[in-house]
Image (cartoon, grey):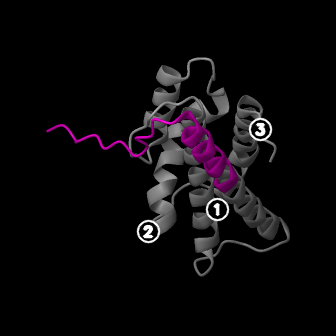
Amino acid sequence: MARARRIISAMTNPVDFKKHSLELLIRAKRDLYTAQQHRIWYNAGNKFDAYNRTNLDSCAYDLQQSVEKILKSIMSFSCVNYEYTHNIVDLAAAVNAGVPVFKINDGIKNRMVSITQWETIGRYGGFTSPAKDIFDTIPVVMTLFKRAVAFTGFRL
Protein backbone atom coordinates (compact mmCIF):
# COMPACT_ATOMS: atom_id res chain seq x y z
CA MET A 1 0.00 0.00 0.00
CA ALA A 2 1.44 3.35 -1.04
CA ARG A 3 1.95 5.96 1.63
CA ALA A 4 0.06 9.19 1.20
CA ARG A 5 2.32 12.07 0.27
CA ARG A 6 1.89 15.11 2.41
CA ILE A 7 3.40 18.35 1.14
CA ILE A 8 4.84 20.41 3.98
CA SER A 9 5.60 23.56 2.02
CA ALA A 10 2.66 24.52 -0.12
CA MET A 11 3.89 28.07 -0.62
CA THR A 12 3.36 29.97 -3.85
CA ASN A 13 4.93 33.37 -3.13
CA PRO A 14 8.68 33.46 -3.95
CA VAL A 15 9.28 35.81 -1.00
CA ASP A 16 7.79 33.21 1.36
CA PHE A 17 10.03 30.51 -0.14
CA LYS A 18 13.15 32.64 0.39
CA LYS A 19 12.19 33.52 3.97
CA HIS A 20 11.51 29.87 4.75
CA SER A 21 14.83 28.89 3.17
CA LEU A 22 16.71 31.35 5.37
CA GLU A 23 14.92 30.12 8.51
CA LEU A 24 15.83 26.53 7.68
CA LEU A 25 19.50 27.39 7.13
CA ILE A 26 19.66 29.25 10.43
CA ARG A 27 18.23 26.19 12.20
CA ALA A 28 20.59 23.88 10.30
CA LYS A 29 23.52 25.99 11.46
CA ARG A 30 22.35 25.70 15.07
CA ASP A 31 22.00 21.92 14.78
CA LEU A 32 25.46 21.63 13.24
CA TYR A 33 26.93 23.82 15.99
CA THR A 34 25.34 21.60 18.64
CA ALA A 35 26.82 18.48 17.01
CA GLN A 36 30.23 20.15 17.03
CA GLN A 37 29.87 20.83 20.76
CA HIS A 38 29.30 17.12 21.39
CA ARG A 39 32.54 16.36 19.54
CA ILE A 40 34.42 18.99 21.62
CA TRP A 41 33.02 17.43 24.80
CA TYR A 42 34.21 13.99 23.65
CA ASN A 43 37.65 15.25 22.58
CA ALA A 44 38.09 16.81 26.03
CA GLY A 45 38.37 13.30 27.44
CA ASN A 46 34.76 12.49 28.16
CA LYS A 47 33.62 9.06 27.02
CA PHE A 48 30.30 7.70 25.91
CA ASP A 49 29.59 5.03 28.49
CA ALA A 50 26.16 3.52 29.07
CA TYR A 51 25.14 6.47 31.23
CA ASN A 52 26.02 9.27 28.82
CA ARG A 53 25.55 7.46 25.50
CA THR A 54 22.68 9.88 24.95
CA ASN A 55 25.26 12.57 24.09
CA LEU A 56 26.37 10.54 21.07
CA ASP A 57 22.75 9.85 20.14
CA SER A 58 22.06 13.58 20.35
CA CYS A 59 25.09 14.39 18.20
CA ALA A 60 23.89 12.01 15.47
CA TYR A 61 20.36 13.38 15.68
CA ASP A 62 21.60 16.97 15.39
CA LEU A 63 23.62 16.05 12.30
CA GLN A 64 20.60 14.39 10.70
CA GLN A 65 18.46 17.42 11.46
CA SER A 66 21.07 19.73 9.97
CA VAL A 67 21.26 17.77 6.71
CA GLU A 68 17.47 17.56 6.50
CA LYS A 69 17.08 21.31 6.96
CA ILE A 70 19.88 22.12 4.51
CA LEU A 71 18.27 20.01 1.77
CA LYS A 72 14.83 21.47 2.44
CA SER A 73 16.32 24.96 2.43
CA ILE A 74 17.82 24.41 -1.02
CA MET A 75 14.45 23.30 -2.37
CA SER A 76 12.62 26.17 -0.70
CA PHE A 77 15.12 28.72 -2.03
CA SER A 78 14.49 27.33 -5.51
CA CYS A 79 10.70 27.57 -5.01
CA VAL A 80 10.30 23.79 -5.01
CA ASN A 81 7.69 22.32 -2.68
CA TYR A 82 8.89 19.25 -0.81
CA GLU A 83 7.34 16.22 0.79
CA TYR A 84 7.02 15.82 4.55
CA THR A 85 9.81 13.38 5.32
CA HIS A 86 12.91 12.93 7.46
CA ASN A 87 14.45 10.53 4.95
CA ILE A 88 17.72 11.96 3.64
CA VAL A 89 17.71 9.60 0.65
CA ASP A 90 14.27 10.88 -0.42
CA LEU A 91 15.21 14.51 0.20
CA ALA A 92 18.44 14.19 -1.79
CA ALA A 93 16.48 12.64 -4.67
CA ALA A 94 14.01 15.54 -4.48
CA VAL A 95 16.87 18.05 -4.60
CA ASN A 96 18.39 16.25 -7.59
CA ALA A 97 15.03 16.29 -9.39
CA GLY A 98 13.87 19.77 -8.40
CA VAL A 99 17.17 21.66 -8.20
CA PRO A 100 19.51 19.88 -10.64
CA VAL A 101 22.08 22.71 -10.49
CA PHE A 102 22.81 21.85 -6.84
CA LYS A 103 24.76 18.61 -6.64
CA ILE A 104 24.71 16.61 -3.42
CA ASN A 105 28.34 15.95 -2.43
CA ASP A 106 29.62 12.36 -2.34
CA GLY A 107 30.25 12.52 1.41
CA ILE A 108 26.52 12.94 2.01
CA LYS A 109 25.56 10.45 -0.71
CA ASN A 110 27.76 7.80 0.90
CA ARG A 111 26.19 8.38 4.33
CA MET A 112 22.51 9.02 3.45
CA VAL A 113 21.12 5.76 4.81
CA SER A 114 23.08 6.00 8.07
CA ILE A 115 22.19 9.68 8.56
CA THR A 116 18.50 8.89 7.96
CA GLN A 117 18.60 6.25 10.70
CA TRP A 118 20.10 8.74 13.13
CA GLU A 119 16.82 10.68 13.17
CA THR A 120 14.95 7.87 14.91
CA ILE A 121 17.81 6.35 16.87
CA GLY A 122 18.87 9.75 18.17
CA ARG A 123 15.47 10.22 19.75
CA TYR A 124 14.70 6.71 20.93
CA GLY A 125 18.09 5.08 21.53
CA GLY A 126 19.41 1.76 20.31
CA PHE A 127 22.42 3.37 18.68
CA THR A 128 24.84 1.28 16.64
CA SER A 129 27.13 3.72 14.78
CA PRO A 130 30.63 4.21 16.22
CA ALA A 131 31.54 7.67 17.49
CA LYS A 132 34.20 7.96 14.78
CA ASP A 133 31.60 7.55 12.00
CA ILE A 134 29.44 10.25 13.54
CA PHE A 135 32.29 12.67 14.17
CA ASP A 136 33.71 12.06 10.67
CA THR A 137 30.35 13.18 9.30
CA ILE A 138 30.56 16.64 10.92
CA PRO A 139 32.97 18.16 8.33
CA VAL A 140 30.93 16.57 5.52
CA VAL A 141 27.79 18.28 6.79
CA MET A 142 29.75 21.51 7.26
CA THR A 143 30.77 21.39 3.59
CA LEU A 144 27.14 20.84 2.55
CA PHE A 145 26.09 23.76 4.74
CA LYS A 146 28.72 26.08 3.26
CA ARG A 147 27.69 25.10 -0.26
CA ALA A 148 24.03 25.76 0.57
CA VAL A 149 24.91 29.21 1.98
CA ALA A 150 26.88 30.02 -1.16
CA PHE A 151 24.03 28.72 -3.34
CA THR A 152 21.44 30.89 -1.61
CA GLY A 153 23.68 33.92 -1.14
CA PHE A 154 22.48 34.37 2.43
CA ARG A 155 24.91 35.90 4.92
CA LEU A 156 25.04 33.66 7.95
Image quadrant assignment for residue 19: top right
Q: Amino acid at mark 3?
A: Lys
The label number, if any, that marks residue 146 in the structure image: 3
Q: 144 or 99: nearer the eye?
A: 99
Query: What residue is pinned by disc 1?
Result: 59
Q: Residues within 10 Å of mark 1 (few under 14, many from 20)?
A: many
At 66% across and 28% down in the image, what residue appears? 105
Q: Residues within 10 Å of mark 2 (few under 14, many from 20)?
A: few
Q: Is residue 112 above or below residue 20?
A: above
Determine the CA span between mark 2 and mark 1.
Answer: 13 Å
Query: Most extreme residue toward the left, as rendered?
Result: 1
Question: Could you tell whether 79 is left or right of 46 in the image?
Answer: left
Q: Position of residue 21 (x, y in %)?
A: 61, 43
Q: 115 or 26: nearer the eye?
A: 26
Residue 18 falls inside the magenta stretch: yes
Mark 3: which secondary structure? helix
Q: Which residues are magenta?
A: 1-27
Q: Earlier in the sequence, mark 1 or mark 3?
A: 1
Q: Position of residue 59 (x, y in %)?
A: 64, 62
Can residue 16 be seen at all in this image of the molecule?
yes
Q: Amino acid at mark 2?
A: Tyr
